[in-house]
Amino acid sequence: MSPPIVRLETHMAKGKKIYEGKAKTLYEGPEPGTIVQYFKDDATAFNAVKKDVIDGKGALNNRFSEHFMLGLESIGIPTHFIKRLNMREQLVKRVEIIPLEVIVRNVVAGSMSKRLGIEEGTVLSRPIVEFSYKEDSLGDPLVAEEHILALEWATQRELDDIIAMALRVNDYLSGIMYGVGIKLIDFKIEIGRLTTDDYQQLVIADEISPDSCRLWDIKTNEKLDKDVFRRDLGSLTDAYSEVARRLGLLPKNTAQTAPKLVK
Ligand code: UDP
């Protein structure tokens, strides 16, 4: 008798569900201080007013996040990432999430374009780091450093570290993307406090994927990120797969096409 086919996911010793978010579910991990992040196929936009299930998105984002977190670790930027477990799950360190969305912008787009009436695509003379208070019921409002300090969401020292980390992530991600013909317009990261017996450290947490970045093709300005879903611009899976292929995370399209003459 041939052995039963069991999906890899079912082997994972996940514990109790800790939290269910819009795109991910968190479970207790196998060891104390660990969490299993499960990437769902759900896509939401405009604070979950627009929703859909997009086949394969979770698996792609799991892979993207692994790739970027490992890359950041390799240049000395600490992250919560431990290892990918299977197609949809990764093991991460349990951290205390600072309730801020840390946004870095290189080019004006999205909410900044609307708020200030500046055309999308306007290149900034230097990157901007901005903060939103992570609270869905308020629509994640923009806050100033003064709010963060006065409300004691982070200390001055932490804030200085967060800004320095965010700008390093920007340099790293911009470089990786530029190398595969993509402009990094903006992105969002979340930061966690990792506490061990001896020290406390800030680490990059949550995920880094085209769900939380704006990515435009360098030549055509085609959007290759979640705006494809937000603005109904086509297939989100196609856009994410294109980014994954360029980064070497998916096999190249092997379809034979006739050679084209280049002038
Ligand atoms: N972003 C995100 N989660 C949020 C809000 C923003 O990942 O809850 C990302 C978004 O994908 C973009 C960047 O942060 O890459 C800046 O987003 P923006 O403030 O322009 O907001 P949006 O126009 O997406 O509402």
Image (tube, rainbow, N blue to C red):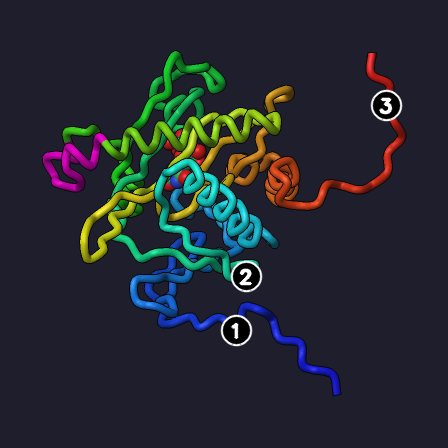
Tag 3 secondary structure: loop
Q: Nearer the viewer, residue 164 or 260?
A: 164
Q: Earlier in the sequence, mark 2 or mark 3?
A: 2
Residue 260 has which mark?
Answer: 3
Check disc 1 and report the residue beneath it: 11
Give the residue type that dot 2 points to: Asn
Magenta stretch bounds = 147-160
Is the residue at mark 2 in contact range of ligand 1, meaning its CB lies under 8 Å from it? no
Q: Along the horizontal axis of the image, is 161 left or right of 184?
A: left
Q: Earlier in the sequence, mark 2 or mark 1?
A: 1
Using the rendered image of the protein, determine whether residue 45 is visible from the camera's viewpoint: no
Q: Main secondary structure of the magenta part?
A: helix
Reply above or below: 234 against 263. below
Quarter residue 219 falls in: top right
Q: Position of residue 120 (x, y in %)?
A: 47, 19
Amino acid type at circle 1 is His
Numbered badge on residue 219: none
How many residues crowd mark 1 within 10 Å: few (<14), some (14–19), many (20+)? Answer: few
Q: Quick one: which residue is furthest to the left in this view?
A: 150
Distance from disc 3 to disc 1, alpha carbons, whole Å, reads: 48 Å
Q: Are marks 2 and 1 in contact (CB under 8 Å)?
A: yes
Q: Is residue 169 found left or right of 230 in the rendered image?
A: left
In the rendered structure, does residue 220 fall within the stretch colored magenta? no
* Residue located at (56% from left, 54% from top): 59
Residue under pointer 2: 86
